[in-house]
Amino acid sequence: MEYISQAVAKEDCFICDAAASEDDETNFVIGRTEHCIILLNKYPYNTGHLIVSPRRHVADITELNQAERDEVMDLTVRSVEQIRSEMQPHGFNLGANLGDVAGAGLPGHFHMHVVPRWTGDTNFMPVVGDAKVLPELLKETFRKLQGKLGPRP
């Protein structure tokens, strides 16, 4: 309801806003590196759904420089490792949507989705009730993962 009850302007970029803010808990930022930011998706497909994104506002993966490409991929791998360790999912969906037609909710800022999956996590609720039920509050997931995906020690 929070999402559908507020009008979001097309030019708003929640990734840039989160990167510029120091309030990681409000923005669900779980890690920052030199070129990237990692945050929980505020409207997740599943518990633990996070986003790995370059800090720089670019729309397409082809616009990333080599350092950003390396960091996005490294953080995607590390995110899978960390979520696997903390939450024991049975699998993952990884991906990016480039452009409106591909389903990008934020087509102006490239980001990679990391979505943990469990056997049986799809049930009748999305089909019959048009609603997704998540077994864990976003703040609980934040506490589990926050600070564990920043720069390598």
Image (cartoon, rainbow, N blue to C red):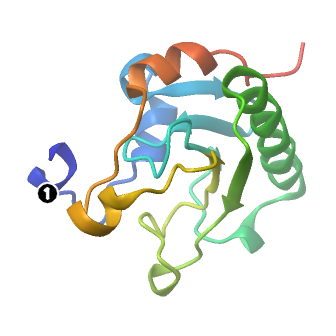
Residue 118: percent from left, percent from top: 63, 45
- Residue 90 appearing in the image: yes
The foreground one among 30 and 18 is 30
- For residue 92, above or below residue 137: below
- For residue 133, above or below residue 39: below
Say which residue appears at 52% left-offset and 34% top-offset. Answer: 19
Residue 64: percent from left, percent from top: 76, 62
Going by the image, does 9 lie left or right of 29? left
Residue 58: percent from left, percent from top: 60, 63
Estimate how packed mark 1 is, as few (under 14), some (14 to 19) or many (20 or more) residues with alpha carbons within 10 Å: few
The foreground one among 124 and 139 is 124
- Residue 34 appearing in the image: no
Say which residue appears at 59% left-offset and 15% top-offset. Answer: 144
Going by the image, does 77 lie left or right of 121? right
Q: Amino acid at mark 1?
A: Ala
Find disc 1 in the rendering and name its residue: 7
